[in-house]
Image (spheres, rainbow, N blue to C red):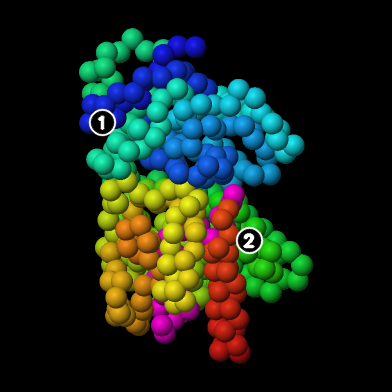
Amino acid sequence: MSKAYLVLDDGTVFEGNSWACEGETFGEAVFSTGMTGYQETLTDPSYHKQIVIMTAPHIGNTGMNTADEESAKIWVSGFVVRNPSPVVSNWRSERSLESDLIANGVVGISGVDTRAITRHLRDLGAMRVGIFSNTKLTRKEMVIKVRKSPQMAGAFLADDVSTISTYVVPAIGEKKFTVLALDMGIKGATPRSMSQRGIEVHVMPSKTTFKELIALNPDGIFLSNGPGDPATMTEMISLVQEILAARIPLFGICFGHQIIGRALGFDTYKLPFGHRGINQPVKNLHSGKIEITAHNHGFAVAAPIVGNFNTIYGAGFVSHICLNDNVVEGLELLESPVFSVQYHPEAAAGPHDASYLFDKFVSLMTDARVANA
């Protein structure tokens, strides 16, 4: 086992052990506070070009299995853990975590204090990071390489993770609706959650045109999660504005929520260190209920959280806020069948407090069908 170094662009260096693949890799340093669900994190396309630091100290004991994968590959640029489990002990496990990381060419580091790294990022904000193992570079040379790597602000990444061609996830049981899901990094659990409610989901490339969408006469359109800076998504924002003008029922999550916000005329901005993990408290401003939710986002929508706001598509309001920092977590229009949330209602591997949002989408499509009958 050789030495490895985690190097932040402010010059801070943490020394640990090489783990999984050796080499060097670069990305945005982000931390996930979930104690479970590392497989879902690794295979979530939203983590493309990011190096994930797990705050929980013991990772890998439940192994990996095909059923829990959110996509066909691991997307993270690097993986940082304190104590990788030396054994796998779970009846559902098919492979070890390290074997999957190696198969996907992921450079990792272990034996570092991941909570100290997390505190550092919380104090100073998100920054670029590199992992170096089996290297002859000096610390100064490693810092220089990290500072030359791309930043997440201004990054256009949706085309890297989007499906190349449309595929269909059939409805379970009786088909009730057809939904077109624009894939900017969709997780497998999302169309599954809709199919369980009688929705046939057509997962379509991010470059799909409005003409191609309406040709399928959908009951609703869904905007997925994904990586990158929403401000770079000019074509998608224009497409969403066409959808809004057509008053087709529209539901967006995470990256899709940010794009809806920009389509409504709001700015988006980079959060100091983002929200990631499966324990984020969100307040539903409709009911006052607190939901524990799954997050993975580094940007947010700059919308007013008090009172209604006006757009060219009608009035709307902020429906949810994060209780940690009052960040906007949901948007809704009053006169059009449109809503979005910043978090993940499909929430594999949990929690499931927000799964009702898929039922809300069904209700919107039902009401639209009755109104257009």
Q: Amino acid at mark 2?
A: Ser
- The structure residue drawn at horizontal position 26% and vertical position 26%, both measured from the top left corner, is 12
Pick the quarter of the image with the C terminus: bottom right
Name the residue: 32% across, 46% down. Answer: 273
> Which residue does the numbered mark 2 point to in the structure image?
193
Q: Secondary structure at mark 2?
A: helix
State the extent of the magenta-drawn residues as a range: 329-349
Q: Which residue is mark 1?
A: 9
Residue 151 in view in this figure: no
Give me the residue at 49% from left, 12% from top.
Answer: 1
Does residue 91 appear left or right of residue 219 in this picture?
A: right
Q: CA distance from mark 2 to mark 1?
A: 39 Å
Three-letter amino acid code at disc 1? Asp
Residue 317: name its quadrant: bottom left
Whether residue 17 is in magenta: the answer is: no
The percent coordinates of residue 167 (x first, y second) are 63, 55
Residue 54 versus residue 205 in the image, above or below: above
Find out whether the residues at labels 2 and 1 contact each other: C-beta distance under 8 Å: no
User: Looking at the picture, does residue 208 appear above or below residue 59?
Assistant: below
The residue sitting at the right extreme is: 173
